[in-house]
């Protein structure tokens, strides 16, 4: 073949190759990030055309916006950008069951019951938990305090006070003794997992919770985004 024809052939092949590569170029959307206090899990390469990204929030936060978004042909994402808003606990419900339903699949509960605020075990337990707040949050644990004996009893979730009748219902529903110190640990499905008649150290509680089935997946996701306690 004459040199001129070889050069034409090489140039034609080059342009054909470039055109072919352009046809095969993967269409990509802008890469999505996990919302603050949340997680993201994407199929495939994450931002290819047709990829789906699913979002979830850490315990204590509720997802607002689209729980899943798809990378469309126009290189835009479907749905609305998700955010994770702090969970709003309603203490003005009529029944203990309605109160517990708010935590279903969102938070684990550590219920501390004491006949009096002066109880030695109660004060010891609060003292041990105070410096362990990060570990509790990491494990999606909400502390519920039931203090006193009816009719002079109160309940507390953080800074929110439970009506005396609701605190009484909670004790009756969970069969927690009124006149002794007790701790009840509940998982995200509302199952009673463990009870302690005496103060439990954070290490004991964390070892128990870290063996819950849902906790394994949480630990994996938290490791991926670098979420940990100092």
Image: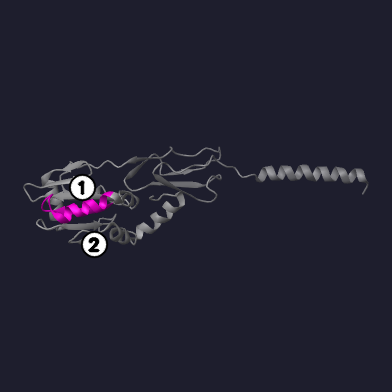
124 falls in the magenta region: yes
Q: Residue furthest left?
A: 151
Residue for point 61% across, 45% down: 26
Q: Earlier in the sequence, mark 1 or mark 2?
A: 1
- Local crowd size for mark 1, using a 10 Å CA cut-off: few (<14), some (14–19), many (≥20): some
220 falls in the magenta region: no
Q: Secondary structure at mark 1?
A: helix
Which residue in the structure is indicated by mark 2?
194
Please state which of residues 15 and 175 is positioned toward the viewer in this rendering: 175
User: Quadrant of the rendered structure where residue 163 is?
Assistant: top left
On the rendered structure, is 197 left or right of 108? left
Q: Secondary structure at mark 2?
A: strand
- Local crowd size for mark 2, using a 10 Å CA cut-off: few (<14), some (14–19), many (≥20): some
Q: Is residue 7 above or below residue 105?
A: above
Of tags 1 and 2, the one toward the viewer is 2
Residue for point 23% across, 62% down: 194
Please state which of residues 226 and 191 is positioned toward the viewer in this rendering: 226
Q: Residue furthest right?
A: 2
- Estimate the x, y position of residue 132 in percent, counting from the top left: 30, 51
Residue for point 33% across, 43% down: 62
Which residue in the structure is indicated by mark 1?
99
- Using the image, tell me which numbered label, if any, was put on residue 170: none
- Estimate the x, y position of residue 135 in percent, counting from the top left: 33, 52
Q: Start and end of the magenta stretch? A: 108-130
User: Quadrant of the rendered structure where residue 22 is?
Assistant: top right
- Estimate the x, y position of residue 20 in percent, counting from the top left: 71, 45
Residue for point 20% across, 57% down: 183
């Amino acid at each position: 073949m004459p040199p001129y024809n070889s050069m034409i052939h090489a140039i034609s092949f080059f342009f054909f190759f470039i055109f072919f590569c352009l046809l095969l170029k993967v269409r990509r959307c802008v890469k999505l990030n996990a919302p603050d206090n949340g997680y993201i899990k994407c199929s495939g390469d994450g931002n290819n055309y047709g990829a789906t990204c699913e979002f979830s929030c850490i315990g204590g936060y509720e997802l607002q916006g689209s729980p899943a978004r798809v990378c469309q042909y126009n290189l835009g994402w479907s749905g609305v950008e998700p955010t994770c808003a702090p969970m709003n606990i309603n203490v003005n419900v009529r029944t203990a069951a309605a109160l517990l339903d708010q935590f279903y699949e969102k938070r684990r509960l550590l219920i501390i019951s004491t006949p009096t605020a002066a109880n030695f075990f109660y004060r010891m337990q609060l003292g041990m938990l105070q410096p362990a707040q990060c570990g509790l949050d990491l494990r999606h644990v909400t502390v519920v305090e039931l203090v006193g004996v009816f009719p002079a009893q109160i309940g507390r979730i953080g800074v929110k006070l439970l009506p005396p009748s609701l605190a009484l219902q909670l004790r009756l529903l969970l069969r927690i003794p009124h006149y002794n110190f007790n701790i009840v640990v509940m998982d995200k499905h509302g199952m009673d997992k463990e009870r302690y008649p005496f103060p439990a150290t954070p290490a004991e509680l964390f070892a128990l919770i870290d063996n819950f089935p849902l906790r394994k997946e949480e630990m994996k996701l938290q490791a991926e985004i670098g979420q940990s306690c100092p």
